[in-house]
Amino acid sequence: MELFRAHVLVCGGTGCSSSGSGELIRRFEEQIAKQGLDKEVKVVRTGCFGLCEAGPVVIVYPEGTFYSRIRPDDVDEIVSEHLLKGRIVQHLVYKEKSKEEHLSLDNIDFYRSQMRLALRNCGVIDPESIDEYIAFDGYKALAKVLTEMSPQQVIDEVLRSGLRGRGGAGFPTGKKWQFAAASQAEQKYMVCNADEGDPGAFMDRSVLEGDPHAVLEAMAIGGYAIGASEGYIYVRAEYPIAVKRLQIAIEQAREYGLLGKNIFDSGFDFDVYIRLGAGAFVCGEETALMHSIEGGRGEPKPKPPFPAVRGLFDKPTNINNVETLANIPQIILKGADWFSSIGTENSKGTKVFALGGKINNTGLVEVPMGTPLREIIYNIGGGIPGGKKFKAVQTGGPSGGCIPAEQLDIAIDYDSLTAIGSMMGSGGMIVMDEDNCMVDIARFFLDFTVDESCGKCTPCRIGTKRMLEILERIVEGKGEEGDIEKLESLAKNIKATALCGLGQTAPNPVLSTLKYFRSEYEAHIREKRCPAHHCQKLLNYEITDKCRGCTACARICPVGAITGNVKEQHHIDITKCIKCGSCIEKCRFGAIVKN
């Protein structure tokens, strides 16, 4: 075994890779060899560190120095100063807003309140090395269940842990396994749902990119518990890095005898196969997902029968999402009592969120269940850019709802979110500030749902389309009295009659914004005004007395709506104005306002 005095960890997740981290790795290896340090310093391509806003990220151990926004030209200085001479390159170290000191990974506010369980190996190990996974207790849990535990004992441990599904409504994982185990059949299947389709969500992708063996190990444990000999990972083809690392991990596990026949000489056979999805949002629904794996059109079917009785290829099937499975090996190794001690009474463990939108620290966050929303937004997320006011946060994607500012201290767990009209979902968390129009937010998510509907059932196919038409009229200033009541009536009918969970939850963004931001709908309809000054068709542009008469706005206006003499206040003809906003962007004196 080679021993190195220093390790350079470079983020190899999708975000940093798109920002050129692959070139950083090449440059580090080149410069380290040039300085004769290749026997002393090892460069490791890892998964996502979480703090995507600061990428590309490089961490140098043993110091734990956290370098952010690194460019290829910075590499030479890090190698010559830090790795060769032991002098940290201070101007490249990550700095927190409002703080002067330079920080290491251990004392960055973004990480202080987090507890990384599902993400424990992401940003820590090389995801393409099974040896590194094994060095961090990898496959130890699988060895334990195959040599020391019966299938029922495994299920009992998962039941006692209180682990609930991390991909939707939060059904108890142990119960799912119990139902599948109780079904009698010669062939059963274990399926991993990695079809992550929510706008802004990338939790599952990051786990697959940073710790693929954890998912394989968990699937094998689940297969042993329910009596399955085959597993399928259904992952969207838009995740090429995740797919590549899964393929490598499967090949490595087979080579080491950790997948395939007679694992650990226990007589247990289990293998895993990858199936690529074409990006249909509806295939995140388990019955549609199974149809797609079988080669059919991704459409849901009525339940019962449930997959545990009649699922993939008409055989008993258990389906869990990536994050759910990532927790399984630790539950087996550390025990159900350890896991259940984290979180709240009905929501055990941690939850991973993709934090995005109007937030300073965009990235991947994992916190104990029950953590207040305020802590996530301000302590971890770093607050709202530009000193703007927090307005709302959308959780659960198109199936979720908006949480308003007055609920900022709510505990983030399954029951609390459901009680206020939202849901945990897979873990998307889109933050909005005072400039966001909540009517347009509802329109955006419903537009996504309409586009992604499989069209099988009438309530979803036609009902959501009618709702979208009403919302589009409202944001264009053509709303009418009675539109709010029509939206509520349609939403309730769709929730009660749609075939699958995706259709049933499609109206949630509309219902939650109506509940907490009804006055915005009323302003759009009755006053033909957008309080957030966002909806273009409802805006009027005005030139104030700050105007210096420089004529820049008149020269940029594409329709000649602005007139005035040089060095005199100009005016906008609102009958000609197309509200493109070019004049505001061009004005250097802040003389043009929207109202």
Image: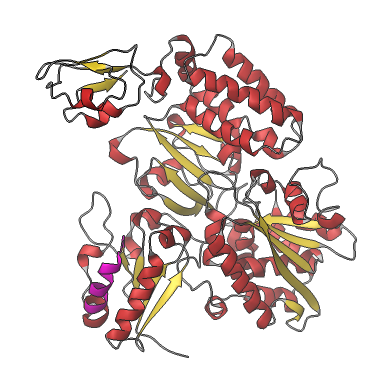
Residue sitting nearer the eye, 351 or 8: 8
Residue sitting nearer the eye, 137 or 28: 28
Splitting the image into 4 quarters, where does residue 182 fall? bottom right
Name the colour scheme: secondary structure
Q: Is residue 16 left or right of residue 424?
A: left
Which quarter of the rendered picture does the C terminus lie within? top left
Splitting the image into 4 quarters, where does residue 566 fall? top left
In the rendered image, the residue lying farthest to the left is: 567
Percent x, y for residue 441? 49, 30
Residue at (31%, 60%) from the top-left corner? 69
Q: Is residue 350 visible?
A: no
Whether 8 is drawn above or below 391: the answer is below
Whether 105 is drawn above or below 294: the answer is below
Q: Main secondary structure of the magenta part?
A: helix
Residue sitting nearer the eye, 406 or 24: 24
Splitting the image into 4 quarters, where does residue 493 fall? top right
Percent x, y for residue 390? 38, 34
Percent x, y for residue 344? 57, 48
Residue at (62%, 36%) from the top-left corner? 451
Q: Which residues are magenta?
A: 68-80
Q: Is residue 189 visible?
A: yes
**Residue 245 magenta-drawn?**
no
Whether 472 is drawn above or below 75: the answer is above
Q: Is residue 218 left or right of residue 416?
A: right
Q: Is residue 120 left or right of residue 328?
A: left
Whether 70 is drawn above or below 441: the answer is below
Residue sitting nearer the eye, 432 or 146: 432
Residue at (37%, 69%) from the top-left corner? 23
